[in-house]
Image (spheres, helix red, strand yellow):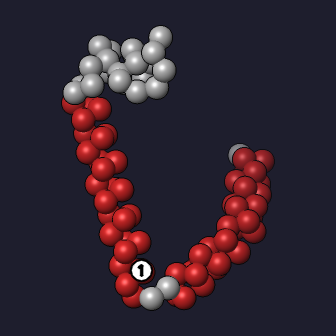
Amino acid sequence: MAARRRSQLATARRLARRGVPIAMELYRRWQSLTPEQRERYLKMARDYASRAGDAYSQRRSGQYGGGRGGRGGGSGGFGRGR
């Protein structure tokens, strides 16, 4: 159990060491945008999220066929045909 905990802490430390500088740079860039640019990016993100949700719902409802639900069943309209 202790070894697992050390492993989790090492992973968290590594992610923080790599992620914090990236997050700070993203924040700095976001702050430098004009309010119009920020709103444009937020609108794009909302649109992308909405489209992803719609695609997920369609996929779950079986609109694209695919026979077996879930993973590994048929091409489902996406990816390469088998």
Q: How many marks?
A: 1
Residue 28 in the image, given as x and y percentages of width and height: 60, 84
Residue 69 in the image, given as x and y percentages of width and height: 32, 21
Residue 81 in the image, given as x and y percentages of width and height: 45, 15
- Viewer-side residue, 50 vs 9: 50
Outermost residue to the top:
82
- Viewer-side residue, 35 vs 23: 35
Quick check: 14 left or right of 79? right
Tag 1: residue type?
Arg
- The residue that mark 1 highlights is 38
Quick check: 31 left or right of 55? right
Quick check: 6 left or right of 51? right
The residue positioned 59% from the left and 76% from the top of the image is 26
Residue 46 in the image, given as x and y percentages of width and height: 32, 63
Residue 60 visible in image:
yes
**In the figure, residue 48 lies in which quadrant?**
bottom left
The residue positioned 72% from the left and 56% from the top of the image is 11
- Viewer-side residue, 38 vs 2: 38
Residue 20 visible in image:
no
Q: In this rendering, is residue 34 above or below 59?
A: below
- Viewer-side residue, 15 vs 47: 47
**In the figure, residue 13 lies in which quadrant?**
bottom right
The residue positioned 75% from the left and 51% from the top of the image is 7
Asked which secondary structure carries label 1, the reply is helix
Q: In this rendering, is residue 53 above or below 39?
A: above
Bin the neighbour count of mark 1 within 10 Å (Cα to Cα): few under 14, some 14-19, many 20 and up: some
